[in-house]
Image (cartoon, rainbow, N blue to C red):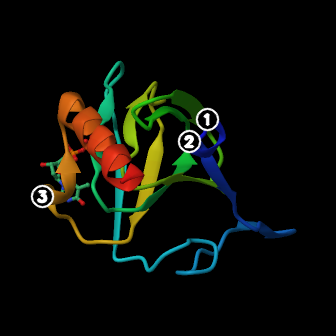
């Protein structure tokens, strides 16, 4: 993966009129997969960092509905960060992207759409195991 591909932001169409703003998200349209799960994180205490894992197969889109937070994305070779602070932008979290979240504002509501139901066996929670998996993948695809 090149450096550019670590931060993939999807800009959602904003349907606004005099009454305010509306964003609509549909599977396989604005969201590039079938949505099987939605979860959201809020009330995060000051100074708390979350994430610190990668998924073997899960694809997700993270949308900061309110407030802001910072993501660090890591493919095992490069790291890039992005601040999410707008409800009309989604960050694609692909499979095998180690991600860490920091600097949650007090009012942050971070919604995540996922293409699979919760499955702990899909998590890689140890960074050394993540690096091992990235290297194994590089070696097996080079054959
Ligand atoms: P965890 O994955 O540790 O959160 P983070 O994204 O910060 O790493 O999840 C916290 C707890 O919530 C953990 O006990 C697993 C549980 N959980 C579910 O039951 N379903 C879910 O969809 C998610 C994301 C977490």
- Secondary element at tag 3: helix
Between residue 3 and residue 112, name the one nearer to us: 3
- Secondary element at tag 2: helix
Q: Position of residue 130 (x, y in %)?
A: 25, 38
Q: Position of residue 41 (x, y in %)?
A: 35, 47
Among all residues in the image, which is located at the extreme top?
A: 47
Q: Could you tell me how far apart the alpha carbons at marks 2 and 3 are, in whole angstroms?
A: 24 Å
Q: Could you tell me how far apart the alpha carbons at marks 2 and 1 are, in whole angstroms?
A: 6 Å
Between residue 125 and residue 24, name the one nearer to us: 125
The quadrant in which the C terminus is found is: bottom left
* In the displayed structure image, the side of residue 137 where residue 7 appears, left or right: right
The residue sitting at 48% across, 37% down in the picture is: 107
The residue sitting at 31% across, 24% down in the picture is: 48
Is the CB of mark 3 within 8 Å of ligand 1? no
The residue sitting at 43% across, 38% down in the picture is: 75
Q: Which mark is residue 121?
A: 3
Q: Is residue 60 above or below residue 96?
A: below
Between residue 71 and residue 7, name the one nearer to us: 7
Is the CB of mark 2 within 8 Å of ligand 1? no
Query: Which residue is label 1 attached to?
Result: 3
Q: Could you tell me how far apart the alpha carbons at marks 1 and 3 are, in whole angstroms?
A: 28 Å
First-in-chain label (1 vs 3): 1
Among all residues in the image, which is located at the extreme right?
A: 18
* In the displayed structure image, the side of residue 52 where residue 13 appears, left or right: right
The residue sitting at 31% across, 62% down in the picture is: 57
Q: Is residue 131 above or below residue 124?
A: above
First-in-chain label (2 vs 3): 2
Query: Which residue is label 2 attached to?
Result: 6
* In the displayed structure image, the side of residue 68 where residue 42 appears, left or right: left
Query: Can you tell which of label 1 and label 3 is closer to the viewer?
Result: 1
Specify the quadrant of the image occupied by residue 129: top left
Q: Tag count in the figure?
A: 3
């Amino acid at each position: 993966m090149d450096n550019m591909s670590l931060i993939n932001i999807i800009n959602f169409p904003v349907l606004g009129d005099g009454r305010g703003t509306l964003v609509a998200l549909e599977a396989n349209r604005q969201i590039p997969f079938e949505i099987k799960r939605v979860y959201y994180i809020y009330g995060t205490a000051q100074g708390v960092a979350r994430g610190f894992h990668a998924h073997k197969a899960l694809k997700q889109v993270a949308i900061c509905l309110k407030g802001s937070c910072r993501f660090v994305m890591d493919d095992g070779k490069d790291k890039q960060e992005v601040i999410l602070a707008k409800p009309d932008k989604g960050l694609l979290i692909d499979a095998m992207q180690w991600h860490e979240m920091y600097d949650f504002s007090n009012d942050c509501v971070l919604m995540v759409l996922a293409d699979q139901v919760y499955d702990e066996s899909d998590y890689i929670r140890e960074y050394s195991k993540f690096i091992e998996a990235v290297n194994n993948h590089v070696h097996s695809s080079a054959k």
